[in-house]
Image (cartoon, rainbow, N blue to C red):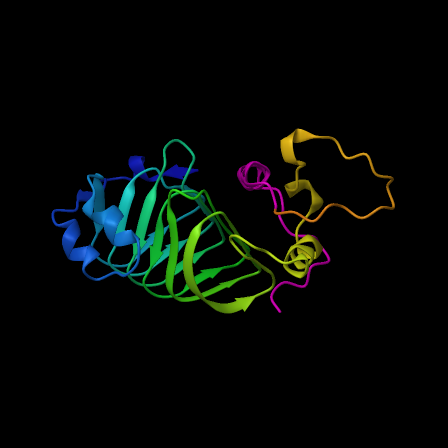
Amino acid sequence: MLTLSAWPGGFARLADPGRIADRTRGQIAGFLRHDHDWRHHPGDLRLPGDTGLDIALVVEGDLTVDGFLDDHVTGLGLLVVLGDLVVGDLLSRGALHVGGDLRADGLVYGYYNDFTFEVAGAVHARALVLDDKFSHYRRGTLGAEIDAYEPTPEQLGAARELLVPEVYGEPGGRRRLWRREEPPTLSRPDPRRVRERLHRGEPLFRAAATGRS
């Protein structure tokens, strides 16, 4: 897996984060103006495989990741993409802002309330899961969607039908006590389990899942 702090040739420091902040809306502008060591790529960027985002990066174009993107592996990453973001899967604990559309082949999962999830365009994914995360986005083509704060049983149930049971855990690590034929408790997927499966190359979606609807 590639980590962006080890990107060949590196990324130049962003000399004027305020210039980028003025081109964005929402909470990300505050992160740009704070004392983060923001790095910069001037145009479109393609990353050739699974990627760990461990820096604060601005891409002034489209970003394409030929694999998954995880911003909490060796260090917490922050990402601003002024164009479109195209990924296999996305797991984001840090701050994310996309000026265009966000397109994922699989899962988009945003969690942890100290940061933000902002997409000026539409989100297209087999499943979008948000957990205690400030978010602003438009709904595109989504197979399932779980709201950040008050998900409905219908939302949680639709995600259960798409995702493999191995991405779910019990609150507090408690063992399930129901009989095999009883239904599981409706909950969000566990981000730790999602990360482990992504990094092991194991599927997140059931084989019978038809994908986007």
- Is 152 on the left or on the right of 78, as rendered? right
Whether the magenta-drawn stretch holds residue 181 is answered as: no
Image quarter in which the N terminus is found: top left
- Is 142 on the left or on the right of 115, as rendered? right
- Given residues 174 and 40, the one toward you in this image is 174
- Is 30 on the left or on the right of 193, as rendered? left
- Residue 20 image-quadrant placement: bottom left
- Residue 73 image-quadrant placement: top left
At a point 64% along the width and 31% down the height, the residue shown is 172
At a point 53% along the width and 69% down the height, the residue shown is 141
Q: Is residue 139 above or below residue 190?
A: below
Whether the magenta-drawn stretch holds residue 198 is answered as: yes
Residue farthest along the front direction in this orientation: 150
- Given residues 160 and 213, the one toward you in this image is 160
- Given residues 81 and 97, the one toward you in this image is 97
At a point 76% along the width and 46% down the height, the residue shown is 184
Residue 165 at what x, y percent from top left? 70, 45
Residue 88 at what x, y percent from top left? 49, 53
At a point 17% along the width and 50% down the height, the residue shown is 17
Give the prevailing secondary structure in the magenta stretch: loop
Magenta-tinted stretch = 189-213
Image quarter in which the C terminus is found: bottom right
Residue 111 at what x, y percent from top left? 48, 45
Residue farthest along the left direction in this orientation: 15
Residue 206 at what x, y percent from top left? 69, 52
- Is 35 on the left or on the right of 94, as rendered? left
